[in-house]
Image (tube, rainbow, N blue to C red):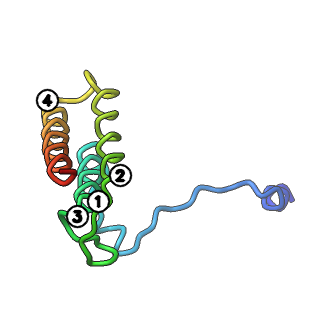
Amino acid sequence: MTDEKQEDTGKSRPVDPPTSTAAASLPTLNFATFIFSLNSSALVQLGMIEDPMTGEQTKNLPLAKQTIDILSMLEEKTRGNLDVDEAGMLKNILYDLRIQYVKEKA
């Protein structure tokens, strides 16, 4: 009887993680993969690589600037908490994206 009351109250139960092939092929989520994901988004927005959804290269410079600003904010907020490799990766990605943004803006 108690079990039925819990069911009726709409309490959520833990959901098992997906076991599909697509989910199994995703990279491990960590700081580096998160930063690489944002980098890829910025490259699409700068028109440097094809949008995986449309297969087309289009530029959206305001959105690219916002993504670069997000990466910059992450660099500032995580300063002192990253290992040497993570900090270097973020610094290099930001440098490259900023240079490309300035080139595209001109």
Does the residue at mark 1 contact the one at mark 3 (Cβ under 8 Å)? Answer: yes
- Residue drawn at point x = 23 percent, y = 71 percent: 50
| CA distance separating discs 1 and 2 | 9 Å
The amino acid marked with disc number 4 is Val
Q: Mark 4 highlights which residue?
A: 84
- Residue drawn at point x = 28 percent, y = 63 percent: 59
The amino acid marked with disc number 1 is Gln
| CA distance separating discs 1 and 3 | 5 Å
Q: Quadrant of the N terminus?
A: bottom right
The amino acid marked with disc number 2 is Pro
The mark nearer the N terminus, 2 or 4, is 2
Q: Mark 2 highlights which residue?
A: 62
Q: Mark 3 highlights which residue?
A: 47
| CA distance separating discs 4 and 3 | 30 Å
Q: Mark 1 highlights which residue?
A: 45
- Location of residue 99 (image quadrant): top left
Q: Is residue 38 above or below residue 50?
A: above
